Image (spheres, rainbow, N blue to C red):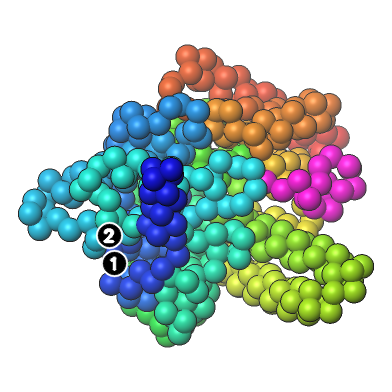
Amino acid sequence: MQQQEFFKERLTKSVGQFDITGKTLLVPDMSPFGARLLTSSFRAYGVPARVMPTYTGLALGKEYTSGKECFPCQVTLGDILYFLQQEKQRLGADFYPGDYVYFMPEADGPCRFGMYNKMHRLVLDKFPEFEDVNITYLSSTDAYSSSMIMPPEKSRLFRRLAYVATIISDVLDRVVWRVRPYERVPGETDAFMDQALQEMQTRIEQMGETRNFKTLFSLLEDIVVRAKELIDPDKPRRPRIGIIGEIYLRTHPQSNQHLIREIETYGGEVVDASLGEWFNFVAYSNLRDTKRLWRIAWKKGDVNGLFQASRKWLDYQIEIKYQMWRQDQTYARALKHLDIEEDHRIASLEKKLDNDRLFNFDIGTEAAISIGGALAYVHENYDGVVNVFPFTCMPSTICSAILKPILLEKKVPFLDTSYDGSIQPNRDLAIRTFMYQAQQRKEKREQKNRD
């Protein structure tokens, strides 16, 4: 009983939402652009955040897990353990764990992601020297509100900046995927975009609390203009491949064994589902839940419930309008110069699923936007779809079960790629075969258009 009370106390007092002002916020790497622009947004509001080195501590992550966890859980656990051990070794007697806060967001629903930060707490407590490293999070239950981890006068403004920074990172990703397969000089795109990322990080941090988003948009437009010059116009367009799946695995290059580069190597042009899509989906889902609560309160005659649901409904409507406004602003600057792919609207994805009676947003999870996103790719004449997910991931397994027969009927190449840290012996062959099929589809589609 005493042990249970101890664990309960650790999971409530050392894992929570508390003011992180003055603490070094340790952010796991995920999307190379997204994670770094997020930390720049934190730094703009006085939080010395930093992205931890990633994948170097995978052996540690596997050592302290059973193998039943999602692969991202093992990767991120390894990242924090490796970083803290290296930091303790570097600082020696000056190492003070209370100076650090580990940032591990969460989501509700059946996905195991909602329990990562609790499990990581239990593992960190196995190391007495790391017991004072607290864990904080933002949650999908309130659309990732930052009001509990920053002073009120900063939290709302930070959240707006962080969202814009996320959309900018999505655009930078799409610029890379549009330019790199057609670059004149191999490696030139990556070198340029590394420099561009540093420029954008500096601009976000310098902007601070001024909220002068025009300066960010101007820099983004300039980056796109310069990136376009790297394209060799004589190179023909390749088959377009759309990626869906679990958000961490599909955006973390090391965990998916650099899948996008592999597809490019074998002749594809890739578009991965964006980070912004997930945040838009969370806000949209919360709005749907609020409508359901309003209907329940109406049936019960609950006046207070109606009032509370109405307030939340208005808040989420404003949130969604703001997201769409900023997203359109950001993409418009890039689309003036380069034909990158725009993002999918969540409402249109739901409509597509409802019309075909394939899935329902009430079920929740990433399966909703993955299935809808895959069908949107098909509608947009993509030549193949890849589903990326951790081994045993429930939402992605649902996606595969629903999409395989549909895409087979539509004669659209489809590839499942699951990851657990091991190298599958047939991976290279599977990708090469998939890309051959995608190329065949592209040629048939173009021939049909000519006829």
Q: Position of residue 37 (x, y in %)?
A: 41, 62
| Identity of the residue drawn at 67% across and 57% down | 281
- For the magenta stretch, what is the residue range? 350-365
Question: Could you say which disc has been placed on residue 23 in the image?
Answer: 1
| Identity of the residue drawn at 51% across and 78% down | 156
Decide: marks 2, 1 in contact (CB < 8 A)?
yes
Q: Which is more toward the observer, 223 or 407?
A: 407
| Identity of the residue drawn at 81% across and 46% down | 360
Question: Could you say which disc has been placed on residue 100 in the image?
Answer: 2
Disc with the residue nearer the chain's start (2 vs 1): 1
Asked which quadrant contains residue 311, the reply is bottom right
Is 310 left, or right, of 124 in this rendering?
right
| Identity of the residue drawn at 82% across and 76% down | 306
The CA distance from mark 2 to mark 1 is: 6 Å
Point out the image quarter for the C terminus. top right
Q: Residues within 10 Å of mark 1 (few under 14, many from 20)?
A: some
Q: Position of residue 348 (x, y in %)?
A: 79, 56
Q: Position of residue 184 (x, y in %)?
A: 42, 44
- Magenta-highlighted stretch: main secondary structure? helix
Residue 296 appears in the figure: yes
